[in-house]
Image (spheres, rainbow, N blue to C red):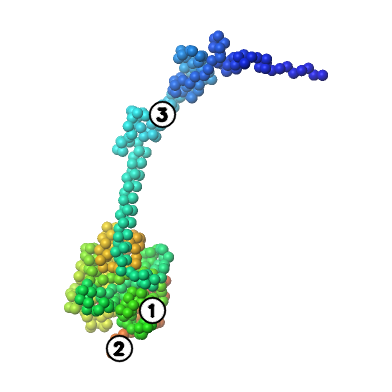
């Protein structure tokens, strides 16, 4: 039979003897054999303390000298030989760490934690970056408030004349995708409204089907002749501008949409009498008039050549047709000049100066009624900044033939040519495949860009 296993030594000790043995094993025994205790020294004193280690002292003793622990004591002899650099390295690392911490927390080096925060001009790079970000954020926030406020006011003012029926007649479009917009110039002048000369009935002086491509930053203007013969349903066959008289904007939108075979997503109505303010707000627009023009009824007298014109002259160009009596149908040439003037306004307003853009939008509030919101205007305006009329504007005229029917002149649609033109426009190409197809070239309007 095996001999009984001897009991472990600590099981034969009293509690005090066990405590003393444990203290001795850890090097915490005082001279008289009384167990001592650990005590932390202030951070940064001595080699052991500098490395985050604990120094031990016997109870009741505060001699300032640490007993032998795991590291070197504060009173130990400095290291020599090939390990002598370690002591200096600890002190150097500690000093560098403390300095980095002060800089990171943004305190001045002189005052430590009691110092003042660094000023923006003389502070740390991190402090200056924080201040810069705050200033930038404040500027951006202010601009956003201005843009949103401006767009809400402009949108509410311009959209006040758009009825629910007009909005219902429009075809929704996807954001950022090409869309068609109907631009209409009316004879609803302030004078006619005040005198009631037309009994509240008005017609459209100009009709433009406009394709806007935000992605390609291209605009296509196609003039619809106001005397084009169309079927207005219950109103019978009429000139297309009579649609505005009988059914307002909703019926006109429907008539043009059916004529062109495309959905119309937006509508804008321009009052020509107030239209001059837009041109004057831009400081005039630059045009190149192909020939000398004199039209007493339109109040227009201009010489051929490149020139800057004011609002009154721009309005005369948009209305003049008798100046072209010797060349053919005056409406052909008038519509070409209208497209030239509109393109010149776009070019000036979108020249790359946001101030001009906002000034133009603000000036247009008194002469334009549209379903476009203020944010729509700002988005499109910024997207088309740097607009080049010679490259980014396509222009054309609906192909028709003049016909005298029952004592009235009408424009009869050339269906084959019209379908070919709209097929090109819908694909983002210019209305004409060749400049020779333009019946007004060299006499009115501007040279149109060609894209095949």
Quarter of the image for the N terminus: give it. top right
Q: In percent of the image, x 56 and y 12: which residue is there?
A: 34
Residue 372 seen in the current view: yes
> Considering only vertical position in the picture, is 129 above or below 82?
below
Quarter of the image for the C terminus: give it. bottom left
How many C-alpha atoms fall within 10 Å of the one at disc 2: few (<14), some, or many (≥20)?
few
Q: Secondary structure at mark 2?
A: strand
Q: In percent of the image, x 35 and y 83: which residue is there?
A: 235
- Looking at marks 3 and 2 on the same chain, the residue that comes earlier in the sequence is marked by 3
Residue 445 seen in the current view: no
> Considering only vertical position in the picture, is 44 above or below 277?
above
Looking at the image, which residue sits at the far top? Answer: 32
Between the residue at mark 2 and the residue at mark 1, the CA separation in whole angstroms equals: 21 Å
How many C-alpha atoms fall within 10 Å of the one at disc 3: few (<14), some, or many (≥20)?
few
Residue 149: give its label: none
Residue 404: give its label: 2
5 and 451: which is toward the camera: 5
Q: In percent of the image, x 78 and y 17: which residue is there?
A: 3
Between the residue at mark 3 and the residue at mark 2, the CA separation in whole angstroms equals: 97 Å
Is residue 190 left or right of 4 when viewed as pictured?
A: left
Is residue 1 left or right of 148 when viewed as pictured?
A: right
How many C-alpha atoms fall within 10 Å of the one at disc 1: few (<14), some, or many (≥20)?
some
Residue 259: give its label: 1
The residue identified by callout 3 is 98
Looking at the image, which residue sits at the far bottom? Answer: 406
Between the residue at mark 3 and the residue at mark 1, the CA separation in whole angstroms equals: 80 Å
- Residue 39 place in picture, x, y as percent: 49, 19
196 and 428: which is toward the camera: 196
- Residue 316 place in picture, x, y as percent: 21, 73
436 and 344: which is toward the camera: 344
């Amino acid at each position: 039979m095996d001999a009984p296993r001897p009991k472990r030594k600590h099981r034969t000790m009293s509690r005090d003897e066990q405590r003393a043995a444990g203290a001795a094993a850890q090097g915490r025994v005082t001279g008289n054999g009384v167990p001592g205790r650990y005590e932390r020294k202030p951070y940064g004193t001595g080699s052991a303390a500098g490395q985050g280690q604990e120094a031990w002292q016997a109870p009741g003793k505060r001699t300032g000298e640490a007993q032998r622990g795991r590291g070197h004591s504060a009173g130990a002899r400095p290291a020599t030989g090939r390990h002598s650099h370690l002591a200096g390295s600890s002190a150097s690392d500690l000093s560098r760490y403390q300095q980095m911490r002060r800089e990171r927390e943004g305190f001045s080096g002189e005052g430590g934690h009691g110092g003042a925060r660094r000023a923006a001009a003389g502070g740390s790079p991190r402090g200056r970056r924080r201040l810069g970000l705050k200033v930038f954020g404040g500027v951006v926030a202010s601009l956003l408030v201005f843009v949103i406020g401006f767009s809400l006011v402009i949108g509410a003012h311009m959209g006040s004349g758009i009825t629910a029926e007009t909005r219902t007649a429009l075809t929704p479009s996807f954001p950022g995708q090409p869309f068609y917009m109907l631009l209409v110039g009316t004879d609803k002048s302030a004078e006619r409204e005040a005198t009631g000369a037309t009994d509240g009935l008005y017609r459209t002086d100009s009709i433009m089907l406009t394709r806007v491509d935000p992605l390609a930053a291209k605009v296509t203007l196609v003039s619809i002749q106001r005397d084009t013969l169309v079927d207005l349903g219950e109103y019978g066959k009429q000139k297309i501008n009579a649609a505005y008289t009988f059914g307002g904007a909703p019926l006109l939108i429907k008539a043009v949409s059916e004529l062109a075979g495309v959905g119309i997503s937006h509508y804008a109505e321009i009052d020509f009498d107030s239209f001059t303010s837009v041109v004057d707000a831009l400081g005039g627009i630059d045009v190149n008039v192909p020939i000398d023009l004199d039209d007493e009824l339109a109040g227009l007298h201009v010489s051929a050549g490149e020139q800057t014109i004011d609002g009154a002259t721009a309005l005369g160009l948009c209305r003049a047709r008798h100046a072209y009596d010797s060349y053919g149908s005056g409406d052909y040439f008038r519509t070409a000049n209208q497209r030239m003037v509109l393109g010149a306004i776009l070019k000036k307003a979108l020249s790359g100066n946001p101030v001009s853009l906002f000034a133009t939008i603000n000036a247009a509030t008194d002469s334009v009624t549209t379903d476009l919101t203020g944010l729509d205007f700002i988005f499109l305006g910024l997207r088309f900044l740097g607009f080049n009329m010679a490259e980014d504007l396509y222009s054309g005229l609906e192909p028709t033939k003049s016909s005298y029917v029952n004592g009235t002149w009408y424009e009869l649609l050339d269906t084959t040519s019209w379908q070919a033109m709209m097929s090109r426009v819908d694909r983002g190409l210019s209305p004409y495949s060749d400049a020779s197809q333009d019946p007004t070239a060299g006499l009115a309007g501007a040279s149109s860009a060609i894209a095949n």
